[in-house]
Image (cartoon, helix red, strand yellow):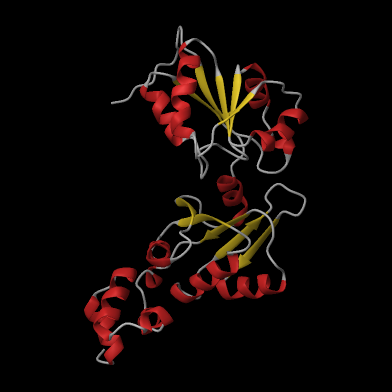
Amino acid sequence: MDSQPKHQSTSGQLFVVATPIGNLADMTYRAVETLKQADIIAAEDTRNSRKLLQHYGITTAMIAVHEHNEANMIQTLLPRLQQGENIALISDAGTPLISDPGYRLVRGLRAEGIRIVPIPGASSVLTSLCAAGLPTDHFRFTGFLPRSGKTRQQALNRINGSDETVVILESPHRLLSTLRNIQTCMDASRELVVARELTKLFEEFVAGSATELISHFEQHAPRGEIVLLIGPATEAAVELTDQQIIECLASPAMQALPPSARAKAVANMLGVAKSRAYALITGNN
């Protein structure tokens, strides 16, 4: 059992501070005061965060803490905290640790008895959910999808069978590719919403099926930060159809394999029985 004390008499605290995802006016009063009063700010990118600090007249010194040095920075920051200094952790935008660095730092400092204090604020996940019009009683955030290969297909398969709204982050350069993947492996009626440039001047929500969204973004090239929301599967759509398996079997990479190996590869990729995949290859279904 891990119980974090409410007060530390000698040690400082690590404040995990949410910052705006676009509109600088979304900074909370508490976040501004925390950053002003901290002894040092641990920022994902000090150059990127300087604009925010200058906007609010925050002169606190910064130190870079990012995915490449996070583990080592625990030993750098821990002595300062133990000596009573307070440190604020911020990411480039939004709530730290949510698809951003910080997990190892928070975990490591908690293990040393340092109090971790969350300062809530902007989050692209919740911002997109509250305006997308998809069910919010149950949802799952998966961050960025794997870019290619078996792990990407497995991730799409999990989403295909999900009875929750799924929230993913996507690059504008990969959005159409992801929508085409969804069109191939998911039910045609699945509800999707693309939330783009949240809280910024050109904020946009585009809702529709995968086919409709592909048509839209082929005509209007996607730009800016993107959150893709995928509505829950209907009960009938949870099970992969034969046609979806056939389309996977017909991909160029699979066509290069002999039938038995192709059936095994697709079965592993899609999570279906090898016998079912083989039957679709041979026509004995």
Q: Residue at x 60, y 25 (%)?
A: 41
Q: Nearer the viewer, residue 100 or 276?
A: 100
Query: In which image quadrant can residue 78 be found?
Result: top left
Residue plotted at (37% across, 84% down):
255
Residue 48 vertical placement versus 116 (above, below)? below
| Front position in the image: 40 or 88 | 40
- The number of discs equals 0
Furthest residue in direction top, as rendered: 9
- The residue shown at (41%, 66%) is 149
Residue 236 quadrant? bottom left
Left or right of residue 228: residue 157: left
- Rendered-image quadrant of the N terminus: top left
Give left or right: position of 90 versus 58. left
Picture coordinates of residue 230, whole percent (x, y):
51, 61
Q: In this rendered view, identify the residue nearer to me: 77 or 84.
A: 77
Figure check: 18 above or below 146: above
- Vertically, is 61 above or below 255? above
Locate residue 37, reporting x and y percent: 64, 16
Q: Closer to the camera, 270 or 112?
A: 112
Asked if one can make out residue 64 in the rendered structure from this viewpoint, the answer is yes
Residue 85 placed where, x, y %? 54, 13
Image position, residue 190 (x, y; %)? 50, 69
Task: Please state, as top left, top right, bottom left or bottom right, where the C terminus lies in the image.
Answer: bottom left
The residue lying furthest to the left in this view is: 275
Q: Residue 189: in sight, yes or no? A: no
- For residue 190, side relative to residue 263 (left or right): right
Instruction: Kindly identify the residue that appears in the image at 43 percent across and 56 percent down.
Output: 164
Q: Is residue 105 left or right of residue 263?
A: right
